[in-house]
Amino acid sequence: MPNTKIENAEKYLSNAPSERAFFVCDGTCLLSLEDTSKFLKTVKKEVFTFHVNKDKNDFYNWIKEIIGDTALAGSIKNLKTSKSMSEKISRRVKELKKTV
């Protein structure tokens, strides 16, 4: 019987199909949680606030709908800084890598 936890971890860690990539307003293309965490470490504030503001959280939506990691999506939904979001995603990536 397959291990659902491992299968989910592998899915969450893999690249999204190119047509479902996260296209950042600065032209950056993100395909994975790892890409996203690294990007958020150095993103300019105005780029981040374009995607995360009082009206929306594009990172939350992409992680929930495309990556499928609803637990991670829920944990970043209300974060308002790129640093806190990067740290949360980075911790999740490390956690997932331990299960595969």
Image (spheres, rainbow, N blue to C red):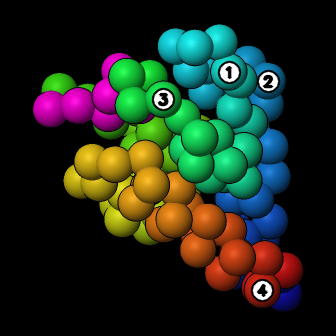
Residue 72 % position (x, y)? 47, 63
Q: Quadrant of the C terminus?
A: bottom right
Front one among 71 and 7: 71
Q: For numbered disc 4, what is the local secondary structure? A: helix
Instruction: Specify the segment rendered in magenta.
Output: 48-54
Q: For numbered disc 3, what is the local secondary structure? A: loop
- First along the sequence among labels 1 and 4: 1
Front one among 9 and 45: 45
Q: Amino acid at mark 3?
A: Lys
What label sits on residue 18 in the rendered view?
A: 2
Label 3 to label 4, Cα distance in Å?
A: 31 Å
What label sits on residue 98 in the rendered view?
A: 4
Label 2 to label 1, Cα distance in Å?
A: 13 Å
Q: Of the residues tagged 1 and 3, which is closer to the observer? A: 3
Residue 14 % position (x, y)? 81, 52
User: What is the residue that sits farthest to the left in this orientation?
Assistant: 54
Indicate the quadrant where residue 71 lies.
bottom left
> Do callouts 3 and 4 mark residues in contact (Cβ within 8 Å)?
no
Residue 34 % position (x, y)? 72, 53
> Do callouts 2 and 1 mark residues in contact (Cβ within 8 Å)?
no
